[in-house]
Image (tube, helix red, strand yellow):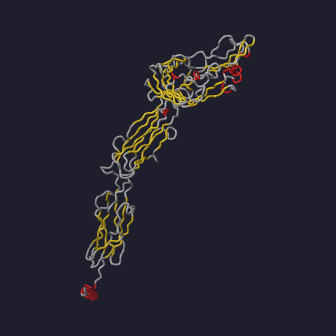
């Protein structure tokens, strides 16, 4: 009992001592906290987000609270600059920090902004010492942003034409800065093999500030793949900026490259069955292993304005490396001693059965031939081009190439020798020496004919091929009847030629 009374007396004395102290002697240390009503703000928000730094006790003087700024958001890029200190005024309980986001046009991840209170000499930190704010990225263009679209939606082409396709990209209105617009390119056409693109960088096109369109080209390459049916598509990629929007329509371009097999049955009606085999007996022998068909060739007479048949026999067939192309069929055979009309060894010779598709033989009076001409078209005669095999009409192309004709001194070439009433010509011996390859002859001079790529038409219903063939030849021995020259520019000639079946 005595112990309890003693403790009570001490407690009362302590209370009296503390309560009797003057208020001016008490040191007040405020506690500071930070808070925000919202912790997320859109980067395109039109007003700032308010962050409050609050103290529980007002002081009679201003005091500063340091602020540490961290996070993925970048000052001056994602938000307007914020001071690293905030001042709570004298007799005040709070200070404001305004977070003002910057609307970045690039579409990216959300950004974070972390504001953390630092320590000070005149205050203490409460439990809430930091606030984390999310600046939500804006991936939606403004309602008045320009829209981007393609000027065309679908293109069908035959790769043999090697067209350069121009693709135009348009904006609904001009923009104040350059716009880089990426594409997604898909399909089974192979870049570098089937096509080449000019005007894109990293599969994107740039529309210059102030312009409303830009173009790029797709150069289709000829792969000579008959039956080809491949596609590619250009589509606008998801925008990485909010400066423009993709139009809901006209936002893809499909390119289809096709090379269907053309039906040649209109012309392939009668095979030529008179290719001579080597003649060794008095009975004429023919080859059965050489397949070819016949054509008639007409030249357009510019004076009479009508077609004129000048040659009938033109042996041709589909080329071995392209089922949509025709080429010459050449037969070289030997007339040997004992064969028909070969009564002496000197009459033995190689002869050629062939024709050229332009008819150059008619315009060189001194062409060297072994019976017939041997002007070989390495790239073929006519290439048939269509995008729809069911159509009766289409395009025919004469490929650019160099033809070689051989001319000679006809007095020597046709120099005639008679022995015991049997005659032979100089070219007989020459053909034996070259075994029918006139290009190896020492008696001939080559003449180059530069054939330009020429475009014409075909019609399977009328069985006609009509084409203006242009070529250049500067040899002075070339002499074309002027009425068959459709156009002429110096040494460059154009002949309008029609081929039909027999």
Q: Within the image, what quadrant is residue 429 found in?
A: top right
Depth check: 488 or 277 in front? 488
Q: Quadrant of the N terminus?
A: bottom left
Q: How many marks?
A: 0
Depth check: 292 or 138 in front? 292
Compared to 12, does 70 lie above or below? above
Q: Position of residue 7 (x, y in %)?
A: 28, 87
Q: What residue do we see at 46% from left, 21% from top?
A: 460
Q: Position of residue 250 (x, y in %)?
A: 36, 40
Q: Position of residue 308 (x, y in %)?
A: 50, 18
Depth check: 276 or 122 in front? 276
Q: What residue do we see at 60% from left, 30% from top?
A: 448
Q: What residue do we see at 64% from left, 13% from top?
A: 285
Q: Within the image, what quadrant is residue 433 found in?
A: top right
Compared to 383, does 91 lie above or below? below
Q: Is residue 192 left or right of residue 252?
A: right
């Amino acid at each position: 009992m005595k112990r309890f009374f003693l403790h009570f007396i001490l407690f009362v004395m302590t209370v009296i001592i503390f309560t009797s102290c003057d208020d001016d002697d008490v040191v007040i240390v405020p506690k500071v906290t930070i808070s925000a009503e919202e912790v997320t703000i859109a980067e395109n928000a039109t007003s700032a987000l308010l962050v409050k730094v609050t103290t529980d006790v007002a002081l009679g003087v201003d005091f500063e609270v340091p602020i540490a700024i961290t996070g993925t958001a970048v000052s001056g890029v994602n938000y307007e600059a914020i001071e690293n200190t905030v001042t709570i005024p004298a007799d005040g309980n709070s200070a404001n920090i305004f977070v003002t986001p910057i609307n970045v046009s690039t579409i990216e991840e959300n950004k974070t902004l972390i504001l953390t209170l630092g320590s000070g000499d005149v205050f203490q930190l409460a439990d809430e010492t930091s606030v984390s704010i999310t600046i939500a990225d804006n991936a939606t263009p403004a309602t008045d942003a320009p829209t981007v679209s393609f000027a065309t939606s679908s293109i069908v082409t035959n790769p043999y034409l090697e067209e350069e396709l121009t693709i135009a990209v348009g904006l609904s209105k001009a923009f104040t800065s350059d716009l880089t617009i990426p594409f997604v390119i898909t399909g089974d056409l192979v870049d570098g093999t089937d096509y080449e693109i000019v005007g894109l960088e990293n599969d994107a096109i740039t529309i210059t500030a102030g312009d409303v369109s830009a173009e790029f080209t797709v150069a289709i390459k000829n792969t000579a793949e008959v039956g080809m049916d491949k596609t590619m598509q250009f589509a606008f990629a998801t925008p990485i900026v909010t400066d423009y929007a993709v139009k809901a329509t006209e936002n893809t371009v499909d390119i289809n490259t096709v090379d269907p097999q053309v039906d040649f049955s209109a012309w392939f009606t009668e095979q030529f069955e008179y290719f001579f085999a080597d003649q060794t007996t008095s009975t004429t022998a023919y080859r059965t292993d050489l397949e070819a068909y016949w054509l008639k060739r007409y030249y357009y007479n510019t004076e009479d304005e009508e077609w004129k048949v000048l040659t009938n026999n033109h042996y041709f067939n589909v080329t071995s490396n392209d089922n949509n192309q025709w080429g010459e069929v050449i037969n070289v055979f030997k007339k040997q001693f004992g064969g028909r009309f070969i009564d002496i060894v000197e009459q033995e010779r190689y002869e050629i059965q062939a024709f050229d598709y332009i008819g150059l033989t008619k315009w060189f009076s001194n062409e060297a031939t072994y019976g017939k001409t041997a002007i070989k078209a390495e790239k073929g005669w006519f290439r048939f081009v269509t995008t729809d095999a069911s159509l009766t009409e289409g395009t025919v192309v004469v490929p650019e190439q160099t033809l070689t004709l051989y001319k000679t001194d006809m007095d020597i070439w046709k120099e005639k020798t008679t022995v015991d009433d049997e005659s032979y010509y100089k070219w007989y011996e020459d053909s034996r020496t070259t075994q029918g390859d006139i290009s190896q002859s020492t008696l001939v001079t080559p003449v180059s004919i530069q054939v330009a790529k020429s475009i014409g038409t075909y019609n399977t219903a009328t069985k006609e091929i009509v084409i203006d063939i242009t070529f250049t030849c500067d040899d002075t021995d070339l002499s074309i009847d002027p009425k068959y020259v459709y156009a002429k520019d110096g040494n460059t000639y154009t002949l309008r030629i029609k081929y039909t079946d027999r």
